[in-house]
Image (cartoon, helix red, strand yellow):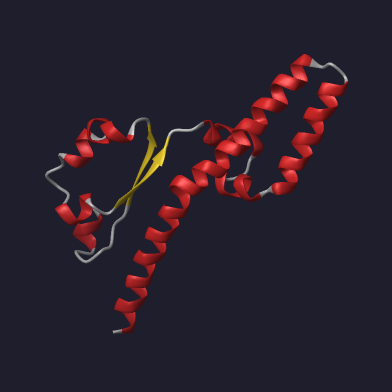
Amino acid sequence: MVKDIDADANIMFALSRVRNLERIDFQYLAFFNSNILTEEDKNNYFILGDSGAIDLSRVMRKSVYELAQDTEAKKEIEFKFDKALDENDEKGQLHYSTVLELLDECFMFSDKYLLNAFKMIDKALEKVKEKKRN
């Protein structure tokens, strides 16, 4: 365990692919009922919900955050969707409309989960820097 090596280690947990925020205690039963973790450790976590945005990020080989910020990629997909509409390409319409929905989901995922996680990580890193200065 990390705490065996460094008792003062600042540990943060990412609880990923959370399906239902109201039942997170059940989904992560072992985490919240652990006898090994301190109460401070158990409260030092952030949540990453389950989302199609994660699947899209794998397909596009970019992080969800990158996809949420990439307005050019969205414009390109919108152009391809419009072209599929003009050409009555039903398969293309379905594909590109799905990708557009998932790109919107990337933005919502970033806003709901990632920005909070980044803040927590920045705060933890600042504590480490402050500790090293003293």
How far across and how far down the image is residue 35, in percent?
11, 44
Q: Can you see residue 57?
A: no
* 33 left or right, relative to 120: left
* 91 left or right, relative to 58: right
- Residue 123's place in the image compared with 11, above or below, is below
How far across and how far down the image is residue 125, in percent?
38, 67
Determine the residue positioned at 78% across, 39% down: 76
The C terminus sits in image quarter: bottom left
Q: Can you see residue 66?
A: yes
Q: Nearer the viewer, residue 66 or 4?
A: 66
- Residue 8's place in the image compared with 129, above or below, is above
- Residue 3's place in the image compared with 85, above or below, is below
Determine the residue positioned at 37% across, 71% down: 126
How far across and how far down the image is residue 109, in percent?
50, 42
| Residue found farthest to the right | 87
How far across and how far down the image is residue 110, in percent?
51, 47
